[in-house]
């Protein structure tokens, strides 16, 4: 069931989770504002790439540098933001914060999991002590090694009576993921007959783990946060700032290229 408004308790959790995105929005501004020309000169762009592309203009260099720096920073940090966001929505806790992990000083099997949902759970006649979830942004962020590691962890979780999931927060097609996961689960000694049971993608994450499809509701609320920041203006302002500094420090692109190595 797709909802434009979430039930009471879930709505409260989503409101708390949106605070995670709001803080990240503030971090984006800090990331962009922190970009400096010295970062560019000190390995911020590949000079071989610049000459191969025929880039001979400071504006193009500033544009490439700022966009590369921002995208890299966002991709690195946003995965953790999604973990925290989903943890808040589901009302779970990090495996590292679980009592068993703490008492084992970080050595317990449960420490590895991004989210732990305690409470008896039954599926197809099988009872579990709880559920554990590994969160990834999307299928493009999942390597063969990641799936093999997940399979080993899933088998271990099942031995302890927990149902395990791999939650991919966006995307639709995951045939490549499921194909690799099947053989990995079998090798690890986990349930492997239907590897799709382990993988939740996009709105299915909410449907299965929360019991409601709140995707549209979450997007609607997140948009309200995003309008506080004009990302395009923020980037353009930084590009102009970098351009101005490049023109002050270097007479031409050749001088900049010389300084970069």
Image (cartoon, rainbow, N blue to C red):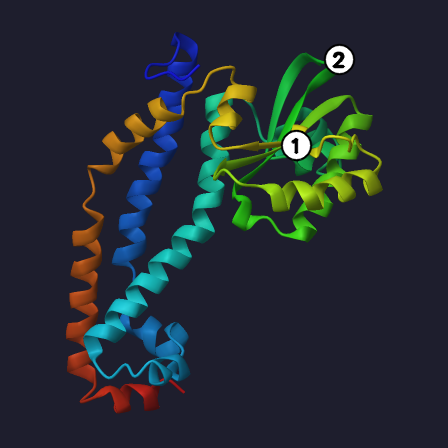
Q: Secondary structure at mark 1?
A: helix
Q: Position of residue 174 (x, y in %)?
A: 57, 41
Residue 125 lies in what quarter of the image?
A: top right
1 on left or right of 230 = right
- Residue corresponding to mark 2: 127
Q: Which mark is residue 196?
A: 1
Q: Relative to the observer, which residue lies in front, 66 or 99?
A: 66
In the displayed structure image, the side of residue 174 where residue 13 appears, left or right: left
N-term mark: 2 or 1:
2
Circle 2 crowding by C-alpha within 10 Å: few under 14, some 14–19, many from 20: few
Residue 105: percent from the left, percent from the top?
72, 37
Q: Is residue 83 above or below residue 91?
A: below
Q: Position of residue 241 (x, y in %)?
A: 17, 67
Q: Name the residue rendered at 33%, 46% in the picture.
A: 27
User: Image quadrant of residue 245?
Assistant: bottom left
Which residue of the protein is positioned furthest toward the top in this rendering? 8
């Amino acid at each position: 069931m797709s909802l434009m408004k979430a039930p009471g308790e879930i709505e409260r959790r989503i409101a708390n989770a949106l605070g995670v995105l709001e803080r990240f929005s503030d971090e984006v501004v800090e990331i962009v504002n922190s970009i400096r020309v010295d970062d560019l000169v000190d390995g911020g762009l590949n000079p071989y790439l610049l000459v191969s592309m025929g880039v001979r203009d400071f504006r193009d260099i500033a544009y490439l540098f700022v966009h590369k720096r921002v995208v890299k920073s966002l991709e690195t940090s946003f995965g953790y933001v999604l973990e925290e966001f989903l943890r808040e929505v589901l009302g779970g806790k990090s495996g590292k914060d679980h009592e068993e992990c703490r008492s084992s000083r970080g050595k317990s099997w449960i420490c590895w999991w991004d989210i732990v949902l305690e409470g008896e759970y039954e599926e197809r006649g099988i009872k579990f002590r709880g559920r554990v979830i590994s969160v990834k942004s999307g299928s493009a962020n999942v390597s063969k090694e990641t799936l093999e590691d997940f399979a080993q962890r899933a088998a271990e979780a099942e031995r302890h009576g927990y149902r395990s999931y791999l939650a991919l927060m966006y995307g639709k097609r995951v045939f490549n993921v499921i194909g690799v996961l099947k053989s990995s689960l079998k090798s690890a000694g986990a349930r492997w007959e239907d590897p799709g049971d382990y993988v939740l993608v996009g709105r299915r994450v909410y449907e299965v783990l929360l019991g409601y499809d709140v995707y549209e509701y979450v997007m609607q609320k997140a948009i309200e946060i995003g309008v506080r920041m004009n990302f395009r203006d923020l980037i353009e302002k930084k590009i102009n700032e970098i351009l101005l500094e490049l023109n002050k420090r270097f007479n031409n692109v050749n001088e900049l290229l010389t300084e970069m190595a």
